[in-house]
Image (spheres, grey):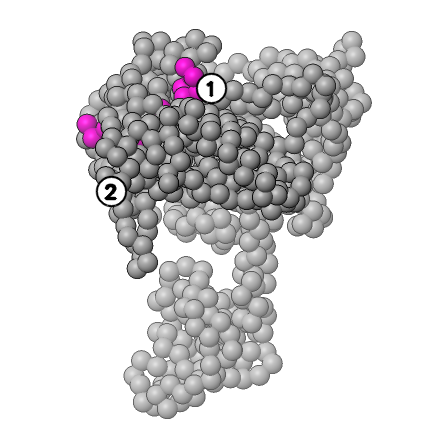
Amino acid sequence: MKFTLSWLKDHLDTDAPVPEITDQLTALGLELEELHDRAAGFEAFVVGHVVDCKQHPDADRLRVCLVDTGSEKIQVVCGAPNARQGMKGVFAPAGTHVPGTGIDLKVAKVRGVESAGMLCSEREMGLSDDHDGIIDLPADTPVGASFVDIMGLDDPVIEIGLTPDRADCAGVRGIARDLSATGIGTLKPGPEAVSVSGGFDSPVRWARDLGDDGDACPLVVGRAFRGVKNGPSPDWLQDRLRAIGLRPISALVDITNYVTYDLGRPLHVFDIGKLTGDTLTMRMARDGEEIDALDGRSYTLESGMTVIADSARPLAIGGIMGGEYSGCQDDTTDVFLEVALFDPIRTATTGRKLGIDSDARYRFERGVDPASALWGAEVAARMILDICGGEASAPTIAGEMPARAPMIVMDPNRVETLGGVAVDTESARKILDDLGFETEIADGKIHAAPPSWRFDVEGEACLVEEVLRVRGFDNIPTVPLRAVTPLSQPAITSVQRQVSFARRALANRGMLEAVTWSFMRDADAAHFGGVTDALRLANPISADLDVMRPSVLPNLVAAAGRNMDRGIADTALFETGAAWESDKPKGQRSVAAGVRSGMAVPRQWGAAQRVVDVFDAKADAMAALGACSAPVDKLQATADAPGWYHPGRSGALRLGPNVLAWFGEIHPRVLKALGVRGPVAAFEVFLDAIPQPKSKASGKSRPLLQVSPYQPVNRDFAFVVDDDVPAAKLIAAIRQADKKLVVDVTVFDVFVGPSVGEGRKSVALSVTLQPVAATMTDAEIDAVAGKVVANVEKQTGGSLRG
């Protein structure tokens, strides 16, 4: 919503400076989006008097002008066809930046004649597209005067952002009303004071043929005008429309646009000479009807859309846009004014279906003051008569005024209990009175009837918000939240903490976090275990999002596929969120899942490339589990991942019978069904399956990370074991040999050959010992090494390789 400061002062009597006004607007919830200084860049432009104008000696289309700037006379070479002696125009001296062309003026010779400035056109000034000639100012314009002052560009433009509930501020008057309630100024008399008597009966009457859809247009008012002159609108009106980004068209059209922005009351005028019959009818469109609208486009209408029609055709799309056929032209002399109320929901639905965004739709779909149907016809009539002349008819009306909202009762104490600020009864009542509410006090409570323009106010809490808003949200004291649980109980659950830990760990591994829908297509869900009927959505937001996701992976795989389609083949995405097994309380699982596609190693000279595989997915899953304090050294890897993983290239990480994670490459059949090129490696970590640490009876907490000041010790071992013994079993045996000192075990080589025997293999491991009490001696290290060898022999049957 845009308006100028002078426009605001038409409704608000105030001397407050602009910064105070804009700060107050934001405090009221009408947030300032931009303050545009229209004078910026025009400081050097002045009114110049052409005291002499001669033909250029070496160019037929150029003239040499001597321009009096009020302080000196400067020679200018000008090519404008309307340049002449005695005229007054806008002069820019050398050194000036011309905004419309982007050039900086310099003293230069034009075909051999020196030119030290420019006489400017509106296009060169950036004011319009008119470049047929230079600006021709009235003869009484003072020479040397600032162009900013002459054109009224010292009037700043204010733009605010409106929330959908504040339809009353879609007009300058509503904004002024809010500001006046804060005491920043006094609201001037409103449009209700305007009244225009009719001199004849309207030759056009209204009819409503809406059947059961009467609420589509509950009330419509009209007035006819004869003998009007539809020329250009006055300069003040054109200036205001240009200031807010609207193009002046003609007096009648400009009046409707002005009232729309000034009072939040959309209007439309029809050329009576183009109507068929003497009746305009509010009715529902018929399927397939077409209309050529004022935006130059043709639209096909559907049933359920409100239209205004004569006996031959639809002439306007109700609440959205008028038709081109009945539009007013320069030769129009007899017009009919339409001032109607339209249903917000139907207006929004029609606008979305047709793809039309108009100022009328913006206001009608949010709601328009019902009373404005009556006073809007009076305001528009006064402007038409003042600007276009002619004679007005008596009003013609069809329908009834909607009922007023009921009285609302507010306990003044609720302002403090709901909003945190104590406001006495009289102060609260005054704020509501200033906003247009009709109030009375009974039994210590405020009884308030909302004004017709505040249909967003529905209950006591709404009145409390109004009082707080005008009193100032900044006046609400900042207080800490009261604890609702004892300090021994954390504010977030352990699973919530694990989500944060897993996200950080996966991000550290170079993966990008994605946020996908919690829903998915039923056909895709079938490839990931499927869903029960309880997980099918009764009212999905989209046809391809009709079930709750049984796994986080399908949406991530689809996201990786979209990246591939756009040339980004190497992707690494993860997401933490919910997956659903059933609609039972425990049917929702907290999951950290991720996918990798393309190459695991970026292309470079020093390393060979390889595609992602099962081990990349396993490493990601292990990193997430480790960050969540899962006992990774005790996990067993089994080859029983579900069917959407590739058999033989996937697995599960278990702690006894509990599955903590699945990992592997996605099955090629699933990738083909999803339309994604493979391979794709993926994992799913089930955060709520990770065992939670037991609390100590003493209440003492164990530090999450203990840093030892003593040097760690690394020792390498090579064990010969049967080739069916997994490396994980060796790692577990080594860790259990001394749980306090062994902090890390890594496999760095596997050898198979005749030297170790048939059916046997040699596994080399690096073991890290970390002392915490003192530096280890050789004897202590040898003792731990002996424990390692003995425990491996006992649990795996392996022997130390000689």
Residue 659 in percent (x, y) is at 40, 19
Q: Position of residue 749 (x, y in %)?
A: 35, 42
Q: Secondary structure at mark 1?
A: helix
Amino acid type, label 1 = Ala
* Residue sticking out furthest to the front: 802
Indicate yes or no whether the magenta region holds residue 667.
yes
Q: Is 197 situated left or right of 595 in this image? A: right
Residue 513, horizontal then vertical, whole percent: 43, 37
One can see residue 251 in this view: yes
In the rendered view, tell whether residue 123 sits above or below residue 591: below
**Residue pointed to by mark 2:** 565
Location of residue 707 with respect to 51 vertically, above or below: above
Tell us which disc is closer to us: 1 or 2.
1
* Residue range of the region highlighted in magenta in the rendering: 652-669
The vertical placement of 460 against 11, above or below, is: above
Q: Which circle marks residue 689 in the picture?
A: 1
Quarter of image, res 487? top right
Task: Judge by depth and name the residue closer to the eye, 697 or 799.
Answer: 799
The residue lying at 64 percent from left, 44 percent from top is: 775
Q: Is residue 347 visible?
A: no
Which of the pair 180/801 is nearer the observer?
Answer: 801
- Density class for disc 1 (Cα within 10 Å; few <14, some 14-19, many ≥20) is some
